[in-house]
Amino acid sequence: GDTTNGQVVAGGKGAGNGLNQLNGPTDVLIDKETDSLIICAAENERVVRWSHRSGTTQGEVLIDDIDCWGLAMDERRYLYV
C-alpha cells in the first residue's frame, strides 16, 4: 500500500516560547517565493517564518505581540493577519 513519510519542518521541540518552538499554532501558509512556512502562533502571540532551507533549526519572528488567529497573503506578497 501507499506509505507517507513525514518530516518535522517547524517546531518539534514541544510547546514553548523559544524560537525553536511553537505554542498554539492556529494557521500556516506557504511562501513559495522564500521557500518557507509562515505560522501564526496564538499562544506565543507572534507570527514566525520557518525557512525550508536545510539546517534551519528555529523560526524568525516577523510580528511580535499580536493576537493572531489567521493569515493570508495576496498576489503582491502582502501578509494579512
Image (cartoon, rainbow, N blue to C red):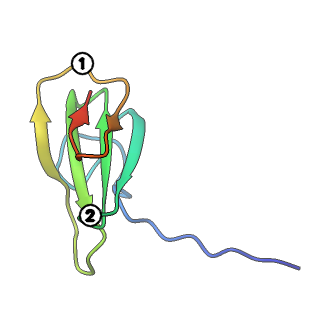
Q: Is residue 74 left or right of residue 62?
A: right
Q: Helix, strand or loop at disc 1?
A: loop
What residue is rendered at 38% in x and 65% in y?
A: 9
Q: Position of residue 80 (x, y in %)?
A: 26, 30
Splitting the image into 4 quarters, where does residue 56 fall?
Answer: bottom left
CA neighbours of label 2 inside 10 A, class few (<14), some (14 to 19), many (20+) = few
> Which quarter of the image is occupied by the N terminus?
bottom right
Q: Amino acid at mark 1?
A: Asp
Pick the residue in front: 40 or 71. Answer: 71
Q: State whether residue 48 is above or below residue 56.
A: above
Pick the residue in front: 14 or 22. Answer: 22
| Marks 1 and 2 in Cβ contact (< 8 Å) | no
What residue is rendered at 19% in x and 55% in y?
A: 59
| Residue 14 visible to an observer of this rendering | yes
Q: Which residue is mark 2?
A: 33
Q: Position of residue 54 (x, y in %)?
A: 27, 81
> Which quarter of the image is occupied by the C terminus?
top left
Give the total of numbered labels: 2
Q: Is residue 60 left or right of residue 4?
A: left
Q: Which residue is mark 1?
A: 67
What residue is rendered at 69% in x and 74% in y?
A: 4
Q: Helix, strand or loop at disc 2?
A: loop
Q: Amino acid at mark 2?
A: Glu
Q: State whether residue 38 is above or below residue 80.
A: below
Splitting the image into 4 quarters, where does residue 51 fall?
Answer: bottom left
